[in-house]
Image (cartoon, rainbow, N blue to C red):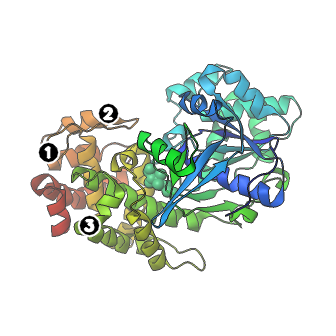
Amino acid sequence: MPADLTYQPKTGIVHLGLGAFFRAFGCVFIQDAMAARGGEWGILGVSLRSPDTRDALRGQNWAYSSVSLAPEGEQARWITVLNDVLVAPEDPDAVLAAMAKPDVRIVTLTVTEKGYCHNPATGALNIDHADVQHDLTHDLPVSTLGFLVRALQRRRAEGVAPFTVLTCDNLPENGRLVRGLVLNFARRLDPELADWIEAEAKFPCTMVDRITPATTAADLVQVAALTGRADAAPVMHEPFAQWVIEDDFVDGVRPDFAAAGGEMVQGVTAHEHMKLRMLNGTHSALAYTGYLAGHETIAQTVADPIFAGYVRQLWAEIMPAVRAPEGVSLTKYADALFNRYANPGIRHRTWQIAMDGSQKLPQRILGSLATNLKEGRESPALCLAVAAWMRYVGGVDERGETIDVRDPLAARLRDVSDSANTPEDKVAALLGVRDVFSADLAAQLVQPVTAAAVKLWGNGTRAAIKEGAT
Ligand code: CS2
């Protein structure tokens, strides 16, 4: 186990979107990097909405347990790298002031897909988004883009170099994407500011990977028994962690990620595509189909032989649409993923992964489908996943129970689904949602997704998988 930190570092990083994932991942890597090589990379965490994490961590001086759930047993570590937590809506000015401090050299992000206020199908800024409209006309922002641009504006006014924006969300070419969005937003506010950001700021791409389910009340009891210490906000995760980072930071200043096992590279795209398509793509496919069939977690889903076969079929369809990073065997990667999914210690709910599907589908599933269509390969398992998402967003499961669909487009998707009666018409109507499907892709998906949907609605998920979707 790595050595723990023997000093409290000064704040060098502000993190926006302090959820379980970053506390189980980025905080651990950064703590390990400092334990190995020193540095002042203490983290100030910012919750963009709820005060819950701040309230839970305050009484324990921002420290918490990070618990690794290996099939052979659990292991807890005490993470002390957080220096403070702010809640943005309570005091946005304090967040901007923290981001503008010269000692802060990096702003890390885990704000989820929908936090970028972009159109998931095209990657373009959604200028009609209420938060974007608000932030273009008010000095104190509510959105991630608003915080980034307003903080950079303060730094420029105060003669301070920009920070590096290190996004850790599961989006394709995530650094380039956020750079484009920041520049678009900044240009509307002040073209000279945009020029300065374009010339001086850095937005490295990253691939992040560690399965981290939301912490539950039962976890608190389990952690107290394991560590003998009460902890109001532990994080639970798998042993595996992989962080691939494009080595492109302002003035080259950054923690020594490699000392903590991070992979510093020139290009991340191949790693990102592989992970988004092979891991997140099958995660989402298993989440919709598994949920509809009544499975609560991913581990339960893949313990069901029908679904174990389904996920193998998905990988067989996805692999030809993925360019393997140098030295990586996609077959071995898929085998390792299967074992990670099957880890019985990880209670990752299908419902949790099913959230925000409108923001996830394009990069997770539709990209592989588009590549296969272009190269003349059929993808019945991927089409079944799209049909399962369509059934899921209709809001009623196979037993007639209501589904609590969480998605920024939930109401619209439900209306579109309800406007049609037959599976054929529902598919046609939902393929018309341009935030998710481009017109070109939608036209090519009508036939194969309809074929899958007819089986799914007609016979149920398990039967649809067994029959194959063509
Ligand atoms: C999951 C991811 O919730 C989801 O959508 O697919 O959070 C997944 O667990 C991580 O990307 C794994 O690194």
Task: Using the image as rendered, state which of residue 145 and residue 95 is in the foreground.
Answer: 95
Q: Residues within 10 Å of mark 2 (few under 14, many from 20)?
A: some
Identity of the residue drawn at 53% across and 43% down: 124
Q: In the rendered image, which residue does mark 1 sit on? A: 399
Give the CA separation, mark 2 to mark 3.
Answer: 27 Å
What percent of the width, then of the height, locates residue 304? 25, 65
Q: Which of the numbered marks, if any, corresponds to residue 285?
A: none
Q: What amino acid type is highlighted by mark number 1?
A: Arg
Identity of the residue drawn at 36% across and 49% down: 349
Label 3: element kind: helix
Label 1: element kind: loop
Left or right of 334 on screen, residue 453: left
Q: Residues within 10 Å of mark 3 (few under 14, many from 20)?
A: many
What percent of the width, then of the height, locates residue 88? 62, 26
Identity of the residue drawn at 69% across and 28% down: 189
Q: What amino acid type is highlighted by mark number 3?
A: Pro
Q: Is residue 68 above or below residue 393?
A: below
Give the CA separation, mark 1 to mark 3.
Answer: 24 Å
Q: In the rendered image, which residue does mark 3 sit on? A: 380
Left or right of 57 on screen, residue 122: left
**Total numbered labels:** 3
